[in-house]
Amino acid sequence: QGSLSGSADNLLNAFRMRDRIDRLFDSVSTYVGLKYTTDQRNNQIGARYQRARVLRKKNRISRSWFSPELLRINRDILQSWLAGKPALNVYRLEIEMEIRRQKHTLDAAREQLLSYFSSFQGSPVRIYNALTTADKKHPIVEIADSGIVTLTDGRYMNLLSTSRNQADRALAFDSMMTTHSNKENTFAAIYNSVLQRDWATAQARNYATTLESYLDHDNIPTDVFTNLIKTVKENSGAIRRYFTLKKKMLGLEEFHMYDRYAPLTDFDATYEYDDIVDWIIESVEPLGPKYQSKVREGFENHWIDVYENEGKNSGGFCSGVYGVHPYILVNYNETIGEMFTVAHEMGHALHSVLANESQPYATAGYSIFVAEVASTGAENLLLRYLLSKTQDPKERIHLLQKTIDGLYGTFYRQVLFADFEWRAHKMVESGEPVTAKSLNELYLQVIDDFYGDTMAKDSLLGYYWTSVPHFYFGPYYVYKYATSYAASTHLINRIMSSDGAEKQKAVDRYLGLLKAGGSDYPMNLLKNSGVDMSDPETYLAIIRLTDELVSQLESEMAKLE
């Protein structure tokens, strides 16, 4: 402290020392964090996880002076150091970011004051996680085909995607939502604390809105976010067409939220884990032998915690650690959905592997804005591979349904979620009270804006916001699924529709994006790979794809008549 402006060597040494400390903290906190996610009932591991967070907080407090001191260095001097000290260029983007965001950086004393609250920033997440995982009491229901079952998160999703009995799907949905509605005020208090925290932080750092504060780090114009929501909302006819078709195919009087993933035929397949491993490895062949061998290495070296257990974190994620292979958690249940989850998370893993191999620690970490490109790209390749393996109309319907359901879940649904959390944040910004009732009403309004009368508005549907962890874990995260899905679709289509030198060029651009890590702003990285995220046409292409897939589905269904 107090020496950064002395010389280029001083600044470089400070950056390097910070990186060494951060790498150590990454290893320690990731290790105990991963152990904790496998059994959140384990108080001993939970205590160690808390200790790791406390140490990280102390580290942040101890260096809260860094950014203010860096910004006091004359700009011309910084430029001369960057020009004369090549090793310092590893930190060029970070330096430029600090300068660009200078008006949002406080003086050293105020930065230190804010840093004292860093551990509390994550309190809503920890409370939500305890409520929905460690302390959750899974409902016990009687299912027509299965008898009395405990409805774990995995069984719930499995039932919605495999049951052809609407009454069973309704019972599962109502039972799961009731466990949340019974705690509606607790969930509202947690989410309100997220909204209030975000607005307080935005104001403290001189942002006009919470949206601006979240987008600014990656230099994303707010128009990219607002145009995405506007474009999808105004062009929701394609997904409404799918819901209407599905209602007709299933012979339903009304189409409900719990009918979204209901199977369209009696094609009943389970997917053994060993089989899907082979398929995922084979599906990435278009990306080249080196990429394929890395995927094989991940499976053979057991990077994945595969099956559901009591106390284990629900869902799936990939955690990358610089200098060590990535770690993946899933809850595999032999369904088509979980098969694609494994492919999705392995896509994340390969993104981390390629970025870590190609970039120094300082620029290896990639933005969430591009994080879902590799994961959704892996899903795209797996789907193409599976469709190429069969001509059976029922299996093709099964796969086409998975495609459209995945497109809905990763694109349309995430944009709807983004609209909800944006409007919820604006409630706080304008001083409106946030209650369970107001959040329920808002969620139902957003559903109506996107889906109109194609989806029934069940009373418990209004509580769905309580079950979306990203609202609590990562505000303004979900829209990035949609942008990444649009980008990966564009990039994979280019690879699969070209040959020879053009195909290799497309592969190189795709892998180049993954290898780039966080070496530039995400909008620039995507543009260099051939995708302009500021162009509405990027999203309209997904709308057209939806229509094309629904038409293909209709064609396959006609073969069964």
Image (cartoon, grey):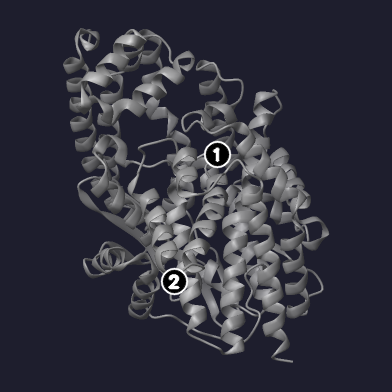
Position of residue 225 in the picture relative to residue 102 (left or right):
right
Secondary element at image label 1: loop
Q: Secondary structure at mark 2?
A: helix
Give the camera-side residue of 206 and 335: 206
Give the residue pinned by disc 1.
476
* 393 relative to 223, above or below: below
Left or right side of 7 for 404: right
Q: Position of residue 543 (x, y in %)?
A: 68, 58
Give the camera-side residue of 17 and 305: 17
Indicate whether 121 appears above or below 493.
above
Residue 72 is situated, as x and y percent measured from the top left of the image, at 34, 7
Look at label 1 and name its amino acid: Tyr
- For the residue pair 264 and 386, the one nearer the viewer reads as 386
Disc 1 packing (10 Å; few <14; some 14–19; many ≥20): many
What crowding class fits label 2: few (fewer than 14 Cα within 10 Å), some (14-19), or many (20 or more)?
A: many
- Asked whether residue 181 appears in the rendered view, the answer is no
Percent position of residue 517, x then y: 35, 44
User: What label sits on residue 339 in the rendered view?
Assistant: 2
Residue type, numbered disc 2? Met
Which badge, 2 or 1, comes first in the chain's sequence? 2
Extreme front residue here? Answer: 501
